[in-house]
Amino acid sequence: MISITKKIEFEAAHRLSSYDGPCREIHGHTYKLEVTVSGQDLNETDMILDFKTLKKIIKTAILDQFDHSLILKDNTENRLFLTNYPGKIFWMETEPTGERMILVMVQLIHSLLPQSIRLDQVVLYETSNSYLTWKNNKG
Ligand SMILES: [Zn+2]
């Protein structure tokens, strides 16, 4: 089994509307994401997956959705003050905590991976000192 990892960075803003503290305000992060996938078999080009293909998948799954976006919980308060906002908003069913965001990202990446490739781990850095790790616990 060989695993490969691709790292990307993106800029986004979010707010935790029900949080009692400064994260209630709209604020930005330079998010860093590390995506690790693995596979048993090498393909016709002697790779488990071309880094270029993984990069494309992460672009479609993550960057197209989240880069330079405003990430918000879809609730009345947020809808009210952003009704006329013409920019890029990623609406979530939940508060956009790192935990909820990484779970959404895992789903988005997983849906685009070839069947022979396993999503092993996703690490999401909110800051250089604070990050979350999702690990695939299924065998
Ligand atoms: Zn934040």
Image (cartoon, helix red, strand yellow):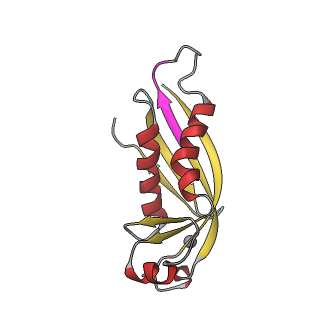
The x and y percentages for residue 130 are 58, 64
Q: Residue furthest left?
A: 138
Query: Looking at the image, is 31 positioned above or below residue 74?
Result: above
Q: Residue at x 57, y 78 (%)?
A: 26
- The rendered magenta stretch, by its main secondary structure, is classed as strand
Q: Residue furthest top?
A: 44
The x and y percentages for residue 112 are 45, 39
The x and y percentages for residue 62 are 54, 51
Q: Residue at x 64, y 48 (%)?
A: 8
Query: Looking at the image, is 96 positioned above or below residue 58?
Result: below
Which of the 4 quarters of the picture holds residue 11?
bottom right
Image quarter where the C terminus lies is top left
Q: Residue at x 49, y 53 (%)?
A: 133
Q: Is residue 30 left or right of residue 115?
A: right
Q: Foreground residue, 58 or 30?
A: 58
Query: Looking at the image, is 101 positioned above or below residue 8?
Result: below
Q: Residue at x 63, y 71 (%)?
A: 28
Looking at the rendering, the quadrant in which ligand 1 lies is bottom right
Magenta-highlighted residues: 35-41
Residue 40 lies in the magenta-colored region: yes
Residue 98 lies in the magenta-colored region: no
Q: Foreground residue, 69 or 8?
A: 69
Q: Residue furthest bottom?
A: 20
Q: How many marks?
A: 0
